[in-house]
Image (cartoon, coloured by chain):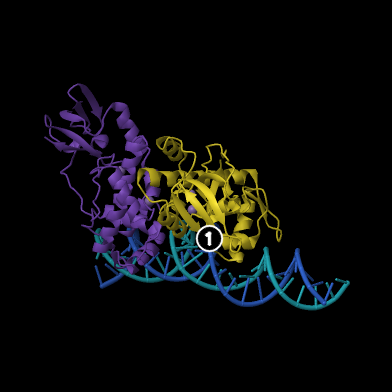
Chain colours: A yellow, B purple, C cyan, D blue
Amino acid sequence: MVLTTAEENYLKAIYHLSDGGTKSVSTNDVAAEMKTKPASVSDMLRKLGDKEVIEYRKYYGVNITEEGKKRALTTIRKHRLWEVFLVDKLHFAWDEVHEVAEELEHIQSPLLIQRLDEFLNYPKFDPHGDPIPDEFGDVKARPRLALNEMEIDSSGQIVAVKDSSAAFLKYLDKVGAYIGARIKILDKVEFDGSMEILVDQKKTLFMSKDVAANILAIQS
Amino acid sequence: MVLTTAEENYLKAIYHLSDGGTKSVSTNDVAAEMKTKPASVSDMLRKLGDKEVIEYRKYYGVNITEEGKKRALTTIRKHRLWEVFLVDKLHFAWDEVHEVAEELEHIQSPLLIQRLDEFLNYPKFDPHGDPIPDEFGDVKARPRLALNEMEIDSSGQIVAVKDSSAAFLKYLDKVGAYIGARIKILDKVEFDGSMEILVDQKKTLFMSKDVAANILAIQS
DNA sequence: TCTTATTTTTAGCCAAGACTAAAACCCTAA
DNA sequence: TTAGGGTTTTAGTCTTGGCTAAAAATAAGA
Ligand SMILES: [Mn+2]
Ligand SMILES: [Mn+2]
Ligand SMILES: [Mn+2]
Ligand SMILES: [Mn+2]
């Protein structure tokens, strides 16, 4: 059963909203994520249900099926591999890749993806620190913690961002936060949750709770 | 004015059928090339006419406009650059690239194409020997001659193929004809136009007129 | 439990891009 | 000059993926 581009995009959204298939997702949530109207989503859910990539019970939201999970992971794999290509080979900035990858992920050619993976030397993470599923859909999970959840005086390394929007990534570039940076939590302000963070043992960064919540680290 | 994928494909077909915009093209010819019905073509011609990439006079065929030529050449440029990428970087065979490039050529990102061109070191020809238009739509033309049009005893070098179908290219691989091969016309059979050709001063090839007509060379 | 607010679905519409069948047009040969 | 054949267009239908408005179902509060 072949999926259209629109179907692939919806399925990917459902996969993400369901936290990898662990919880069910409402029509309204899908509409918000896809920037469409709930009425359009109802229609699409019926189609995805017919194709058995989701389990759809009217009025009770959807759950992604095993087949659906597999399909979504393939699309995610393609998206992230293309992002690596754009950054590593074509020298795109990490805030320039998302929209293009959103199109490239729908190119139909298993050979292309296999060869691309090989060409990129089997990368495990994309430019935003997100893991790239292997060809079987297996994902290498890392325990990640948002900066605002880290304790004062604890240290770690930035490994990913939660928000991949150009605006956010450009901001991180400007202040000098990047994936791989070593960090230490110097202070957390009670009042508004804003934080003071030491980057690479030399630079001090002040950031709002909102920003901190979108930066993911592994503790060391 | 933005063109849809379908519109880009039609425009490219019209560009090719019109020999680069030098002659007008009939509805039936477009239908044959696009493998659609004439009725569908009429509809599309109206749309392309509205967008002023062709000049459309009902019942009298279409001519591509300057704007249309520019658009078509951009799509062709993208198609051929992707083909080079697939062959040079991902080690696709030259008969495996066409369908994938047919999809990749529609990705919308000027930056992507500019960077891809740079990454590939500004190639001038695609894997089938076809010239790659530069970013301004300028094409480096070479005087090319089909093998069946060459005289007995004349020599040259294979530079392109007219037919890029997998079947034809696989056949060429099998018999050992390739782009860059030095050739000499040993004999032409009056009866059926079949030919005997010396390849790289060592291997003799027999081919039908049909095959010869789809191999292009520059004479030396 | 009943009434309301919220969520979701249905119904009806639209545009793109395909199709078939039928009508209209163009050209040529008698 | 006109009839016929081939070409092209039009009319009507279908599918996909959107939309709005209205109806229906669920959930929550009194
Ligand atoms: Mn996408
Ligand atoms: Mn990413
Ligand atoms: Mn194409
Ligand atoms: Mn080619």
Who is closer to the viewer here, A166 or A116? A166
- Going by the image, does B143 lie left or right of A171? left
Relative to residue A77, is residue A210 depicted above or below?
below
- Going by the image, does B129 lie left or right of B185? right
Who is closer to the viewer here, B215 or A176? A176
Relative to residue A143, is residue B2 depicted above or below?
below
Is residue A114 shown to the viewer in this render?
yes
The C terminus of chain B, quarter of image: top left
- Residue visible at 37% across and 37% down in the picture: B90
- Residue visible at 68% across and 57% down in the picture: A61
Name the outermost residue toward the top. B202
Under mark 1, the amino acid is Ser
- Residue visible at 29% across and 27% down in the picture: B175
* Mark 1: few/some/many CA within 10 Å (<14, 14-19, 20+): some
Q: Name the residue under label 1.
A: A208
Q: Residue under mark 1: which chain is it in?
A: A
- Going by the image, does A192 lie left or right of B111? right
- Residue visible at 29% across and 62% down in the picture: B61
Q: Which image quarter: residue A60? A: bottom right
Q: What element carries label 1?
A: loop
